[in-house]
Image: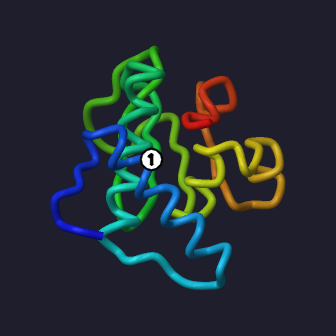
Amino acid sequence: MTGSRSPDDPADVASAVAACLAGWDAGDEPEQSTLRVAVRGTLRALAVAAPGRSVEVRVPPLAAVQCVAGPRHTRGTPSAVVETDPRTWLALATGRDTWPDAVAEGRVRASGQRADLRAYLPLLG
């Protein structure tokens, strides 16, 4: 992946997501730069789809975003947190995985009010 791709360009994000998923499907790990664009871009898309600051969604070590309408979080640990790994996040963002399955299997840790993101997923078709 070239350095010209941006997590703000929807075409670049879609391309990065596709490259990551194809790599995993082939048994390979995606390039970090590609993974970073995919995760950051889809998290930004979530923040647009669910504007607000009541839930913090974390995909360590790549990115985090605050989203979902409700009480604004400003300092310390937010009252609602969602955390998952990059592979699970991209599977959720694309509809390859479902929220209930990922939570039940422990691949997503979600706590607090408004931490259920199923109404906003998938982000990409």
Residue 53: image x %, image y %? 37, 25
Residue 82: image x %, image y %? 55, 45
CA neighbours of label 1 inside 10 A, class few (<14), some (14 to 19), many (20+): some
Above or below, 59 relative to 29? above
Residue 84: image x %, image y %? 57, 58
* SS for callout 1: helix
Q: Which residue is at the front of the view, 22 or 39?
A: 22
Above or below, 3 relative to 38? below
Q: Which residue is at the front of the view, 81 or 7?
A: 7
Q: Give me the residue at 27% from left, 40% from top.
A: 9
The quarter of the picture where residue 74 lies is top left
Q: Give me the residue at 33% from left, 56% from top.
A: 37
- Mark 1 lies on residue: 14
Residue that extends furthest to the left in the rendered view of this protein: 4
Q: Looking at the picture, which amino acid does disc 1 mark?
A: Ala
Residue that extends furthest to the bottom in the rendered view of this protein: 28
Q: Which residue is at the front of the view, 21 or 115?
A: 21
Q: Quadrant of the C terminus?
A: top right
